[in-house]
Image (cartoon, rainbow, N blue to C red):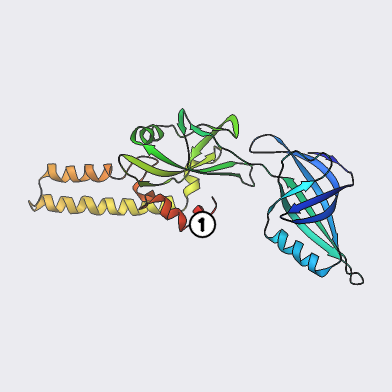
Amino acid sequence: MEVNALVFPVELITGDVRIPAHAASRSKKISPHTNNPLVVLEIEVRLARRADQQFVEKFVADRPLVDAEFDGAPPGSKWEVRQTSFRYSNDSPVRTYEWELKQHESLALEALVVGNIELKPYRYREEFGGDERLTIHACVALTENERAAIEALPGNFRVVRRGINDTAREMRFGQCIWSEAEGKTVKAELFLIDNDPDEPASALLEPMLSNLELLSIANNTAMRELLGALVEKGVLDQAAADGIQTRAAASFGGSIFRRIHRVGDLDEWLKLTTRGAKY
């Protein structure tokens, strides 16, 4: 990060209110999303009137996007107020607020290319975790052919976020939630995460996966015992019992669109969950 230690005036604008401040430093930080340079300012706001202090404290708590005027500000830019603190002394009414002001970046996805499948999500979000791995949540409506193509993908595949960053990343699927839609389509929230060759894919779903495996083994054993008893008593012939087993296995679904990840309606389900609230 390139940092310049300068002091220059800055004016924050929110609605009809202007908040005077000064910047103690200006730096540039490379965005992990787009690889574009973003301006970061360290600013101070000094206020003596209690009403003004209460206004800016509420203003900061709401985490709004603001306009900022200063020499060299990128045209049309919006700003995020981050990493806030303040200080004061008992013998003075003045409070000094210290904020990080970061240039806001609008992520406008044009298409999500998964393998060689081009998708147009109707909801989309992406974020980088503390380990600097990218995670993507993308809601899409899929045709039968698109669904089949997604299920045919290998464990790891290339992903391009066209409109955000055209550099391909090697990613894999996490837990994808889905529901049937009108016609021969499904709605799915695809969850993708940067591939880590040192982390097995199953680790993303533990301990749920191990517990489900044990439950599945127990249920499968019970089914075989029941069918065997029915064949032995002449209630079913062996061909009918084998057919039940085959249809049961087929109903479980493919590697991505498993029955255990199916919901009644994806969009309604997302409205009720913290996972949906993050869009």
x 8%, y 52%: residue: 235
Q: Residue furthest left?
A: 234
Asked whether, in this view, residue 88 is left or right of residue 28, the answer is: right
Q: Is residue 247 visible?
A: yes
Asked whether, in this view, residue 198 is left or right of residue 188, the answer is: right
Which of the two residues, 100 or 176, is positioned nearer the viewer here? 100
Q: Residue furthest top?
A: 116
Name the quadrant containing residue 170: top right
**Looking at the picture, how far across and down is residue 180, in whole percent?**
34, 46
x 60%, y 41%: residue: 133
x 80%, y 41%: residue: 27
Badge 1: residue crowd in 10 Å (few <14, some 14–19, many ≥20): few
x 74%, y 56%: residue: 16
**SS type, badge 1:** helix
**Looking at the picture, how far across and down is residue 61, in whole percent?**
69, 61
Q: Is residue 213 visible?
A: no
Name the quadrant containing residue 98: bottom right
Amino acid type at image mark 1: Thr
If the image is split into quadrants, where does the N terminus sit? Answer: top right
Residue at numbered disc 1: 274
Name the quadrant containing residue 104: top right
Which of the two residues, 269 or 207, is positioned nearer the viewer here? 269
Q: Residue furthest front?
A: 16
Which of the two residues, 228 or 153, is positioned nearer the viewer here? 153
Q: Residue furthest bottom?
A: 90
**Looking at the picture, how far across and down is residue 217, in whole percent?**
32, 51
**Looking at the picture, how far across and down is residue 109, in whole percent?**
55, 37
